[in-house]
Image: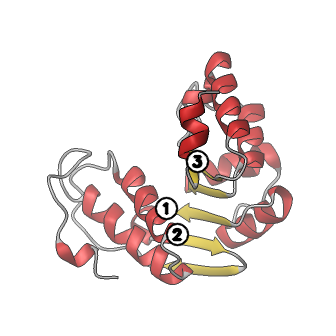
Amino acid sequence: MSSWLTAWNPGWLYYGTLFPSRPSSREALLRVLLALPDAARFYDLNLRPGFDEPDLIESLLGLADVVKLNEDELRFAHEHFGLPVTPEAFCRAGSERYGWQGACVTLGARGCALFLSGDYVEAEGVPVKVADTVGAGDAFAAAFLHALISGWPAAQIAAFSNRLGAYVASVPGAIPDQAPAEIFSA
């Protein structure tokens, strides 16, 4: 592994399912994870047709410290790994089985369910007129990881993540030009 990567020594690694779906890419991800054993690992399932091989996903779940998924992915985990289908039971059972510090299930317009270090919260969604959902899940994940790294409590993380995800869904395109200040007033 490159010495620049180990010298950089990031605190977090963020990965999804698409990149490691190819054997050579999976090997590359595993090399990065092995080279940075102290980095916390954030897994955003982000399943797509053709990129949803159960053995891969279960191995990625087992490597994660924190997991984010949506309701469809929750049902996938229930069907393939026998995890509970309700958000709270899923988060608790997955944390027990895989050793996660946290898990989050996004619930679309209804908000999200978040389990973090034993605390479980549900946060209501932010009502918006949806213009384009592309990028909303990624914005949610970015807000979630930012707030988590910042040491915010679970309820504040969930509310902030919902606000940013809803804002991105309310504007055309995956990357808005700028976010309104009220998103950042936690």
Q: Earlier in the sequence, mark 2 or mark 3?
A: 3
Residue assigned mark 2: 148
Q: Residue 37, relative to residue 100: is it above or below?
A: above
Residue assigned mark 1: 145
Q: Residue 145, relative to residue 114: is it above or below?
A: above
User: Horizontal and vertical percent for residue 91?
Assistant: 71, 66
Q: Secondary structure at mark 1?
A: helix
Callout 1 touching callout 3 (CB < 8 Å): no
Callout 2 touching callout 3 (CB < 8 Å): no
Which of 82 and 59 lies nearest the eye of the viewer? 59
**Mark closer to the observer (2, 3):** 3
Q: Earlier in the sequence, mark 1 or mark 3?
A: 3
Callout 1 touching callout 2 (CB < 8 Å): yes
The Cα–Cα distance between marks 2 and 3, rounded to whole angstroms, is 18 Å
Q: Which mark is residue 54?
A: none
Figure label count: 3
Residue assigned mark 3: 9
Q: The disc labelled 1 sits on which kind of residue? A: Leu
User: Residue at (42%, 53%) from the top-left corner?
Assistant: 137
Q: Secondary structure at mark 3?
A: loop
Q: The disc labelled 2 sits on which kind of residue? A: Leu
Considering every residue shown, the one lying at the far left of the view is: 177
| Side (left or right) of 114 relative to 34 | left
Q: Secondary structure at mark 2?
A: helix
